Amino acid sequence: MQDWANWAIETAKRRGASYADVRVMDVRHRDISTKNSEVGTLAESESLGLGIRVIASGAWGFASTDRLTREGIQACAAEAVSIAKASALAKRENVALVPEKSYVDTWQNPFVKDPFRIPVERQIEVLLDANKEMRRVKGITVAEGSMSFRRIEQLFVSSSGSSIHQIKMQSGAGIVATSFAGSEIQKRSYPNSFGGQHMLQGYELIESLDLVGNAQRIAEECVALHSAAQCPEGQGTIILGSSQLGLQIHESIGHPIELDRVLGMEANFAGMSFLTTEKLRHLKYGSDIVNVVADARLEHGPGLGTFAYDDEGVPAKCTPIITNGLFTGYLSSRETASAIGENQSGGTMRCESWNRLPMIRMTNISINPGTWRYDDLISDTDDAILMETNRSWSIDDKRYHFQFSTEIGWEVKDGKIGRMIKNPSYSGITTEFWNSCDAICSRDYWTLWGTPNCGKGQPQQVMGTGHGAAPARFRNIKIGVAFAK
């Protein structure tokens, strides 16, 4: 890998690049899914190649190749420089980057069991056993399960002297029970919707989830939802479970703080942002107890947004995003940080594969734990709807107006959790919502959730992000019914 990167850097410099960086990536995938006790997906693949990014004549150029001979790599580097010089003909100004030190380092996330050394037959057996347990429950129409594993080995080399080797192992799994009754469909997911839980861990994560042991409970809740009362409508108090709060963070904080969206450099999939630069350090984003960070460091947890260095060679860091309710930080790159007068990058540039440009992506965007015990939060609440596990969402292209629905809800009356309710939803305006937060549970109830499928860019790049959250309470929220008959 090192030779390949050196050939690319040397060629780019000879062709006139003032700066160049190379990402050599070897990515291995394994994806398994089951449906009604049959294998649906069984796929394994590996991709190896090199991408080179250059600045020449004050503009960016990028090219990639999987032809990993000296001639192939030199041709790729030459093409990147040619693209940069062509782009310079239409540039408004020269590319400017905040300074960054050079680093020579190697890093691998800790894990116990390599999932690629676990026989695939054993992994399939776990999913089929979970399917079987769900289907034992009368009324279940579809029982599904999935596992996903990624091993990403990457070498980053820059013309400024960095050489950084990283290996990341990602694992994830989940199960879903679905029940059709008349014209109504209900579903329950475990441990989370849209693929379950994913982290920077090995197969030990899958074992800790105990998919088989939770399958019957999830299926019984799914069937019971048909007989549950519809969610009451009106203005009221809601308590969000930690996984739902994680998605709320993703959509109404994570995307709008991407500085490329703010500056109009990116608008695909999630639009732009209401967080224009004059709001930095002035906007009251949330109540005084709301503290949110963008933290890529391993000490924050083994999230999908965890690494040692980003794809510009910037060390992982913790950036305060919301501090005692005040908006205090963006997700930034070396270029976008320079554009708004900051003196360092937020270290959030990442790419999905060797044939994609790095772009600003969420790391682990997490709300810091509060002080409440969960039981005390419930007993302190007279009248609320407890909502758990996302079912659907929508949000406008400035990330300001939103609506979310969850798979299940529970009435909270006089400090006790009462009857199950179905089809709960809530809506609001981002800043009003976060300013309505008046209680957050403590570290004992905080979970770092993984979102493996965040899409951005054109052509699309799918990236994993992390979101740490504990159950939290919000006052005076518009509550409604999703999927009403």
Image (cartoon, rainbow, N blue to C red):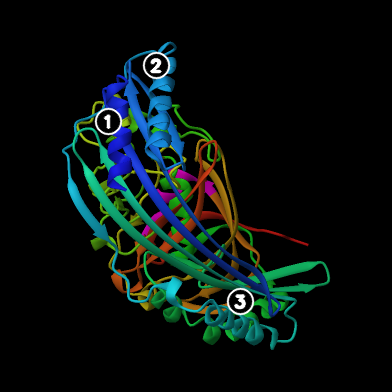
Q: Amino acid at mark 1?
A: Glu
Q: Circle 1: is it few (<14), some (14-19), or many (20+) Cα within 10 Å? A: some
Whether the residues at callouts 1 and 2 have beta carbons within 8 Å, the answer is: no
Q: From the viewer's perspective, is residue 375 above or below residue 484?
A: below
3 or 1: tag closer to the N-terminus: 1
1 or 2: tag closer to the N-terminus: 1
**Magenta-colored span:** 428-438
Q: Is residue 481 magenta?
A: no
| Figure quadrant of residue 260 | top left
Give residue 420's mark. 3
| Number of numbered discs overlaid on the protein picture | 3
- Separation of residues labelled 3 and 2 (CA atoms): 63 Å
3 or 2: tag closer to the N-terminus: 2
Q: How far across and down, in percent of the image, does residue 225 sit?
A: 67, 75
Q: Which residue lies at the image location 45% right of the left edge and 27% below the top edge?
A: 264
Q: Secondary structure at mark 2?
A: helix
Left or right position of 350 against 386: left
Q: How far across and down, in percent of the image, does residue 140 sit?
A: 72, 79
Q: Which residue lies at the image location 33% right of the left edge and 64% below the top edge?
A: 302
Q: What residue does disc 1 label?
A: 10
